[in-house]
Amino acid sequence: MLETVLDLAAVVGRVRGMLFEPDATLAAHGVPAPNWRIVVREHALPVLILTSIGAFLLLALLLSVSNVGTPIGLLVLFLAVRVAVNLAGLFIMAAVVRFYAGMFGAMASFDAAFTLVALAMTPVYVAEMLGPGVQLLLSGPAAVLLVVLSIGYALTILYRGTGLVLRVPQEQRGAHFGLTLVTLVVLMMLLGLLLGPYILPMPA
């Protein structure tokens, strides 16, 4: 079970577990699922904040080596937004996962869905943190590849975890996962269309 008092050693242990032993870690910390507020407080927020700090340090190093002048305040703002956006993304993903779990007669618990999603996305947050370092040591495409591979790994964990955490029947996991993935892609496209004009500069 997730701890009720923040323990950094436990956070690091869960991160390590989700990277190298995801099934065992899901079983240990997701069954039974704790309240989603505990997951936010004891896993999601600490992981997002710690990886943002790590990303800040590596990105600052990358920019200094590349002789690119970027205000420190802008980097801090960017990483703060990263925490907020990723946390909001967890809630959206969990809502979608929960919705389709109920459709297939599985455990329609938001606590279980949020726990699964928060743990499954851990490798992505670690990869995002390491990206600037990989770019510094290797190349930009290598950093992108690392993030893409981490997303594939996270989706694999999500698929496998639907049976363990949400009790989706084996024969229906493929349909549940497919619908979840399609819905999330459509939501991302819609959000991109809605928010794009406010984020990307418009041609004069």
Image: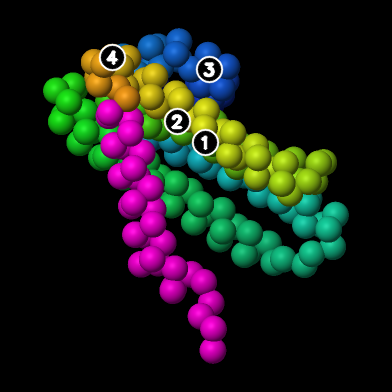
Residue named by callout 1? 151
In terms of secondary structure, where does tag 4 sit?
Answer: helix
Contact? badges 1 and 4 (CB < 8 Å) = no
Count of numbered marks: 4
C-alpha separation, residue under disc 1 versus residue under disc 3: 17 Å
The residue range painted magenta reads 175-204
* Other-residue count near label 3 (Cα within 10 Å), few / some / many at <14 / 14–19 / ≥20: some
Judge depth for marks 2 and 4 and give the one in front: 4
Closer-to-camera residue (77/180): 180
Residue named by callout 2? 155
Q: In the rendering, at what x and y percent does residue 115 appear?
A: 34, 27
Judge depth for marks 1 and 3 and give the one in front: 1
Residue named by callout 4? 170
Going by the numbered disc 4, the residue's amino acid type is Gln
Residue that appears at 69% across and 66% down: 71
* Other-residue count near label 4 (Cα within 10 Å), few / some / many at <14 / 14–19 / ≥20: few
**The image quarter in which residue 177 lies:** top left
Q: In the rendering, at what x and y percent does residue 22 appear?
A: 48, 17
Q: In the rendering, at what x and y percent does residue 81 appear?
A: 49, 56
Please name the predominant secondary structure of the magenta segment in the image. helix
Contact? badges 2 and 1 (CB < 8 Å) = yes
Residue that appears at 44% across and 13% down: 23
In terms of secondary structure, where does tag 1 sit?
Answer: helix
Residue named by callout 3? 17
Going by the numbered disc 1, the residue's amino acid type is Ile
Task: Work out whether mark 1 precedes mark 3 in sequence or the reverse, and give the earlier one.
Answer: 3
